[in-house]
C-alpha cells in the first residue's frame, strides 16, 4: 500500500489547451494518506472522474505529476500501478462464473493456482459471495455484480489503492446502505487506501474519514464531514453540503459587525474591513424564528417533515431556509430571524475569511 | 369487467390477409399444386401424387447439388465470420476515419448481384482480367472456366468480397455498444488482448453474430445470380448449386412438376436448418444466463 501524491496536476481534454476554461481539471495539489478512506464529492461534470482516472492511469494528465509514495508513476500504465477500480456500471465477465471472475486478475498475473484458490475463497467469504462462487456472473443482480467488481480488486494482495467511481448509482436504495456499511467494515479490516467518487453527500459523509469537495474542476476543500459542515472554505461547499444548504446574505463588514440591509449584526469576532463581494453564511440549523429582535423575514412557506419543520423565506431579497424542531411552535407574529453569531461564516468573493485574532 | 365480443374487428385484418394471400399463399399453393401433377403441352395436367418427390429423393443430381451447396455455405461461413470479426475489431472507433471506413466497407453491399458476377467474371479472366492475369503471370495455372477447383476458389472469393462487409458492419455495431468501463476494468485486471476479445468482445457480439450467421447461411444457401453470371454452374456441374439446378430444371427443361417438388423441399431444408440453428443458439443463450 502507498500514499498517493498529486503535484500541480491539471488535465484538459482539448488537444491544445489555451486558457483556464479548456481545463476539465484545474491545478490540483493533493496527498492521499496511506490507508485512509476519502470521498471525492462534487456535482456531475466537476472533474472528479477525470481525477480518478488520472490516478488509476486510464488518463495521462496534461500537466503535473502523480507519485505513489516517492515513485513517479505519471507515465506508468495502469498495470504497473496496482490500482483497483470499481466503476459506475458493474463490470463482470459474463461468460465466467463468479469464481473465475474473482480469479481473473490473478490468473493474468501468472499467480500459482493454489494461491489463487485460497485468495478467491477468502475474498468471497469476506464480501459474502461464497454461496454464489459456482454461478454464472451474468444472471446476478447489480449489487452482486458490483461486489464481484470490488472482489476482483481486493483479491490482489499488491493493491495500492481502491478507487470507486460512483459505485452505488445503479443499486437499489435499500441495498445501498448495506453495501456502504460493508465497504466501511472492509476498510477498517484491511486498511486499503480508498477513494470514493460520488455526487451524493450522504454517501460521502458516511463513508469517508476525509471529504474532498470539488466544483468546476477545482478542489475547494478537504476536510472531515464536521469541518465541511461548520467551516466551509468556499460558499459552494456551504451550499452543497447540508440539506438545505447554507444561507447567504450579502453584507458589508466593519470590524466585528456586519451590516445587512442596514441592520447591524454582531459577529463576535473582528474581520477588519473587507472589499469585493462580501456575504455572511449561516446554516439553516443555526437561525431561529423569533417575534422580537433580528432581521425582518418574509415567510414564503413552511413544510412539516414530521421530525423537523422547514421554513423558507426572504431577508432583504435573499432566500433563507430555517430548520427547526417539529416541537417548536410557529405563530403569526414570528417575522424576525435571529442568527447565532458563533456559527456565522464570512465569505469574500466566494472564499471563506478567517477572523483576525480572537474576540 | 365483461368482455365485449365484436366480430367486425376481423374486417380490419382483411387487407393484410388479402395482401399476404396474393403475395405468398396463392403462389406457394400453385407450386404445391404443380408438385403433385405432371404437365404436357396445351395445359394438360395429370395427378401423379408423390411420384416427383420419390423420384427426386432417389436422384443423384439433387444430392450432388445439395452436397455442393452445403460445402459452399460451410466454406463461406468459416471464412466470412472470422474475417468479418477481424475487420470490425481493426476498424477505427471514432473520427472521420471511422466514417470513411464504414462507407468503404458498405460499398460492396450496394452493388447489384449480377453486376458483382460481371465484375468478377472480367476481373478473374486469365487472358484480360487483372486478377487472372496477375495470378497466371506469377506462374500459377489458373482458369476458372476450365478447372473445377479454380472455379470454386473464384466463386468463394467473390462471395467473401461481396458479403464479409455485412458481417463486419454487424460486428462493428456490437463492438461499439460495449461501454468503455469494460475495457478499463480489463486493463486494471491486466487482461491480454486475447482475453479482452474472448471474455468481453465475443460475448457482447454474440447477439449480432447469431444474426450474421443466420443471414449468411440463408443467403448463401440460396445463392444464384453471382455464380450463374460468373460460371453458369460450370465447368461441368462443378458450381451448380441448388438454385442453379432448380432453374435449369424449371426453365431449361420446363419440368414444372419435379421443379415444384424440388423448390418445396429446398424451402423446407432452409426453414429447418434455420429453425434448428436459431433454437440451439437461443437455448444455449438461456443456459449461459443461468436461467
Image (cartoon, coloured by chain):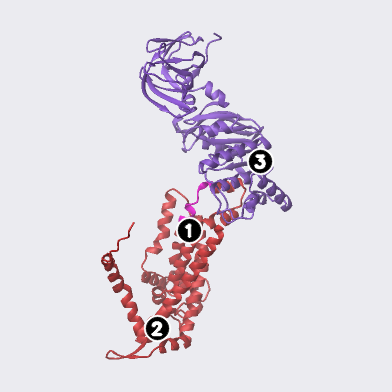
Q: Determine whether label 2 and label 1 are within 8 Å by CB.
A: no
Q: Which is in the foreground here, disc 2 or disc 1?
A: 2
Same subunit under labels 3 and 1?
A: no
Residue A176 percent coordinates (x, y):
54, 40
**Mark 2 crowd level (few <14, some 14–19, many ≥20, 10 Å Cα):** many
Q: Looking at the colours in the rendered structure, which chain would you say is drawn in red? A: B
Q: Which residues are magenta?
A: B171-181
Q: Residue furthest front?
A: B2
Q: Quarter of the image holding residue A123?
A: top right
Foreground: B128 or A79? A79
Colour of chain A as rendered = purple
Q: Which residue is mark 2?
A: B261
Q: Determine whether label 3 and label 1 are within 8 Å by CB.
A: no
Foreground: B254 or A240? A240
Q: Which residue is mark 1?
A: B171
Q: Quarter of the image holding residue A61?
A: top right
Q: Quarter of the image holding residue A34?
A: top right
Q: Which residue is mark 3?
A: A159
* Helix, strand or loop for disc 3: loop
Residue at position x 43%, y 55% from top? Answer: B101
Amino acid at each position: 500500500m502507498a500514499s498517493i501524491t498529486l503535484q500541480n496536476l491539471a488535465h484538459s481534454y482539448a488537444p491544445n489547451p489555451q486558457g483556464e476554461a479548456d481545463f476539465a481539471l484545474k491545478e490540483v495539489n493533493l496527498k492521499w494518506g496511506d490507508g485512509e478512506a476519502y470521498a471525492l464529492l462534487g456535482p456531475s461534470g466537476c472533474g472528479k472522474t477525470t481525477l480518478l482516472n488520472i490516478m488509476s492511469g486510464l488518463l495521462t494528465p496534461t500537466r503535473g505529476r502523480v507519485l505513489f509514495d516517492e515513485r513517479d508513476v505519471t507515465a506508468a500504465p495502469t498495470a504497473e500501478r496496482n490500482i483497483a477500480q470499481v466503476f459506475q456500471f458493474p463490470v463482470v465477465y459474463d461468460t465466467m462464473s463468479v469464481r473465475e471472475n474473482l480469479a481473473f486478475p490473478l490468473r493474468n498475473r501468472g499467480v500459482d493456482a493454489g494461491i489463487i484458490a485460497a485468495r478467491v475463497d477468502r475474498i468471497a467469504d469476506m464480501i459474502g459471495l461464497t454461496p454464489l462462487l459456482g454461478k454464472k456472473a451474468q444472471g446476478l443482480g447489480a449489487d452482486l455484480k458490483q461486489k464481484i467488481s470490488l472482489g476482483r480488486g481486493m483479491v490482489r494482495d499488491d493493491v495500492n489503492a481502491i478507487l470507486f467511481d460512483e459505485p452505488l448509482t445503479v443499486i437499489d436504495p435499500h441495498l445501498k446502505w448495506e453495501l456502504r456499511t460493508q465497504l466501511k467494515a472492509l476498510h477498517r479490516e484491511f486498511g486499503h487506501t480508498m477513494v470514493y467518487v460520488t455526487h451524493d453527500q450522504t454517501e460521502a459523509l458516511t463513508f469517508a474519514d476525509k471529504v474532498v469537495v470539488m466544483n468546476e474542476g477545482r478542489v475547494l476543500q478537504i476536510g472531515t464531514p464536521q469541518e465541511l459542515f461548520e467551516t466551509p472554505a468556499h460558499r459552494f461547499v456551504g451550499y452543497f453540503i447540508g440539506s438545505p444548504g447554507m444561507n447567504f446574505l450579502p453584507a458589508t463588514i466593519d470590524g466585528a459587525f456586519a451590516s445587512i440591509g442596514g441592520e447591524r449584526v454582531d459577529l463576535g469576532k473582528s474581520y477588519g474591513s473587507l472589499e469585493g463581494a462580501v456575504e455572511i453564511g449561516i446554516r439553516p440549523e443555526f437561525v431561529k424564528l423569533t417575534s422580537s429582535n433580528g432581521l425582518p423575514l418574509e415567510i414564503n412557506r413552511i413544510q412539516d417533515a414530521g421530525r423537523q419543520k422547514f421554513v423558507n423565506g426572504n431577508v432583504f431579497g435573499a432566500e433563507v431556509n430555517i430548520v427547526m424542531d417539529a416541537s417548536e411552535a410557529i405563530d403569526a407574529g414570528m417575522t424576525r430571524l435571529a442568527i447565532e453569531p458563533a456559527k456565522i461564516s464570512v465569505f469574500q468573493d466566494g472564499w471563506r475569511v478567517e477572523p483576525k485574532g480572537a474576540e | 369487467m365483461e368482455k365485449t365480443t365484436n366480430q367486425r374487428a376481423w374486417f380490419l385484418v382483411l387487407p393484410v390477409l388479402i395482401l399476404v394471400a396474393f403475395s405468398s399463399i396463392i403462389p406457394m399453393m400453385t407450386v404445391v399444386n404443380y408438385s403433385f401433377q405432371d404437365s404436357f403441352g396445351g395445359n394438360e395436367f395429370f395427378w401423379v401424387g408423390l411420384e416427383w418427390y420419390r423420384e427426386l429423393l432417389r436422384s443423384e443430381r439433387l444430392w450432388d447439388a445439395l452436397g455442393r451447396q452445403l460445402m459452399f455455405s460451410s466454406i463461406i461461413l468459416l471464412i466470412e465470420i472470422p474475417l468479418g470479426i477481424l475487420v470490425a475489431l481493426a476498424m477505427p472507433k471514432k473520427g472521420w476515419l471511422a466514417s470513411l471506413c464504414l462507407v468503404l466497407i458498405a460499398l460492396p453491399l450496394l452493388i447489384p448481384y449480377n453486376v458483382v458476377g460481371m465484375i468478377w467474371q472480367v476481373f478473374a479472366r486469365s487472358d484480360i482480367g487483372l486478377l487472372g492475369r496477375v495470378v497466371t503471370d506469377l506462374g500459377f495455372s489458373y482458369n476458372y472456366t476450365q478447372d473445377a477447383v479454380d472455379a470454386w476458389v473464384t466463386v468463394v472469393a467473390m462471395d467473401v468480397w461481396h458479403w464479409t462487409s455485412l458481417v463486419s458492419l454487424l460486428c462493428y455495431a456490437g463492438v461499439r455498444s460495449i461501454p468503455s468501463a469494460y475495457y478499463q476494468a480489463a486493463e486494471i485486471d491486466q487482461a491480454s488482448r486475447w482475453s479482452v476479445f474472448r471474455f468481453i468482445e465475443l460475448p457482447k457480439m454474440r447477439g449480432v453474430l447469431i444474426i450474421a450467421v443466420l443471414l449468411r447461411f440463408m443467403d448463401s444457401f440460396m445463392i444464384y445470380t453471382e455464380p450463374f453470371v460468373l460460371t453458369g454452374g460450370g465447368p461441368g456441374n462443378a458450381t451448380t448449386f441448388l438454385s442453379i439446378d432448380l432453374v435449369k430444371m424449371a426453365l431449361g427443361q420446363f419440368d414444372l412438376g419435379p421443379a415444384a417438388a424440388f423448390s418445396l423441399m429446398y424451402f423446407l431444408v432452409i426453414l429447418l436448418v434455420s429453425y434448428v440453428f436459431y433454437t440451439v443458439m437461443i437455448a444455449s443463450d438461456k443456459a449461459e444466463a443461468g436461467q
